[in-house]
Image: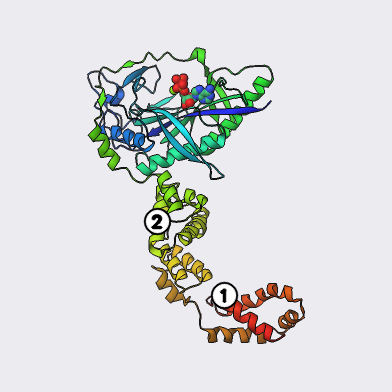
Amino acid sequence: MQWETVIGLEVHVQLATRSKIFSGASTAFGAEPNTQACAVDLGLPGVLPVLNEQAVAMAVQFGLAVHAEIPEVSVFDRKNYFYPDLPKGYQTSQMYHPIVGAGEVEITLDDDTTKRIRIHHAHLEEDAGKSLHEDFHGMTGIDLNRAGTPLLEIVSEPDMRSAKEAAAYLKAIHSIVTYLGISDGNMAEGSMRCDVNVSVRPKGQEAFGTRAEIKNVNSFRFVERAIAFEVERQIELIEDGGSVVQETRLYDPERDETRSMRTKEEANDYRYFPCPDLLPVVLDEAYLEHLRSQLPELPADKRARFQDALGLSAYDASVLSASREMAEFFEEVHRVCGDAKQAANWVQGELSGALNRENLSIQNSPVSAQQLGEVVRRVLDGTINGKAAKQVFQALWNGQGESADAIIDAKGLKQVTDTGAIEGMIDQVIAESPAQVAQYRDSEPEKRGKMIGYFVGQVMKASRGTANPQQVNDLLKTKLDALL
Ligand code: ADP
Ligand code: MG
């Protein structure tokens, strides 16, 4: 039997407002427990929530970025349940009239093909506090700093058909929210978490299978692994004559498996109703137009422009537009050196390699975009060759100079293109290598091309890497062939 996987994601994005969604308490990460929860967050009697306008603006910006309908009216509802990290006894959310309606996101797959994933809706809600199970023996600690942090929950249609597609979708959402600057997207700190709904069906069948929902997966890799495990589990279960039950499961990264948390029968009845403390949110066309006019160029548009206007390959365009920082860095290198392909090669090659080796993000690159652009410009105008450029890059990386030009001067890396000078070096190398010359002369003509490498290496060494490699090659060939 052939099986098909069906996946829908609910992504929770913490919005980067300075204060909470209904109070003035700070949202900064990492403060001492319970120092950033005020009377509103604690649900004390006699206080009223005030909606943070910035959270509304950010949610709408997201909606506009995914070409969603933005309804004129949205309404906050209370989702009632009891849990220690929820002091109010309900979460303020949006059940029936979310702020963002149906939209869509384009994802890019490994083979550079794209696919549209529909978004069902996105709604605003408040985050809960945190239960700390590890710090207290036999007890649970409660930290309410996170309570009331604005969340945008983005609910997809069940349009994904593989773990790879789900990861690509999550990456697309990540890049949209970070481009917009509405979230820091820091998954390790929980700024973006996702619930993964997974089901399987026999290939060709139209009806969906019963799904399991895996809660709170917080990395791209875990999303893929949790899905892989879950798909195996469901297929095995069905093939052994059983059936999948609708339930909530937990992914355990240490054991790389999912475990049941609660089944549908145990599910809460949330008794949703409109929050009487908050007015409906009414947005007019002028407000939407204002936000629309402030949207930055988004990842999909940037990718298309990199391909169409700059002539980059689909792969380069997609890598370089994946994050806003990467895109801005590349564009600055391009602006300075004037050659998109070379700029792309250097950013993805030398620079990304060095960043990966030292586990640095591009924002913390020791070599600035301006500096790298100048290195590339000096290669393009013939001042240095590719080999010397790598030395200049390394020197900039190590802080051994302020600019490419300063390092080229200080290290004497200017490319030697003077034919006389290069011929002098060649003559010397030939004179010092009688055995290799004899070997060259005695070998078959078609093998000589390969043997010339030895002489090129020697001449480059003699020039301390500064000779023009093409000239060295051409002149060597002429001189060696003259000895035949
Ligand atoms: P609920 O109201 O129980 O939360 P929804 O219909 O809102 O359920 O769906 C929640 C998420 O589950 C959505 O992202 C949706 O795409 C996904 N989903 C729904 N049905 C399936 C299914 N059979 N298989 C996989 N994902 C599904
Ligand atoms: Mg849901």
Q: Position of residue 478 (x, y in %)?
A: 64, 82
Toward the viewer: 196 or 359? 196
Going by the numbered disc 2, the residue's amino acid type is Glu
Above or below for 420 versus 235: below
User: Which badge, 2 or 1, comes first in the chain's sequence?
Assistant: 2
The residue at which mark 2 appears reads as 331
Q: Position of residue 124 (x, y in %)?
A: 34, 28
Toward the viewer: 74 or 458? 74
Outermost residue toward the front in this view: 308
Element type where label 2 sits in the image: helix
Q: How many discs appear?
A: 2
Above or below for 205 versus 30: above
Q: Position of residue 262 (x, y in %)?
A: 52, 18
Q: Quadrant of the C terminus?
A: bottom right
Element type where label 1 sits in the image: helix
Q: Find residue 470 and name its label.
A: 1
Above or below for 457 versus 319: below
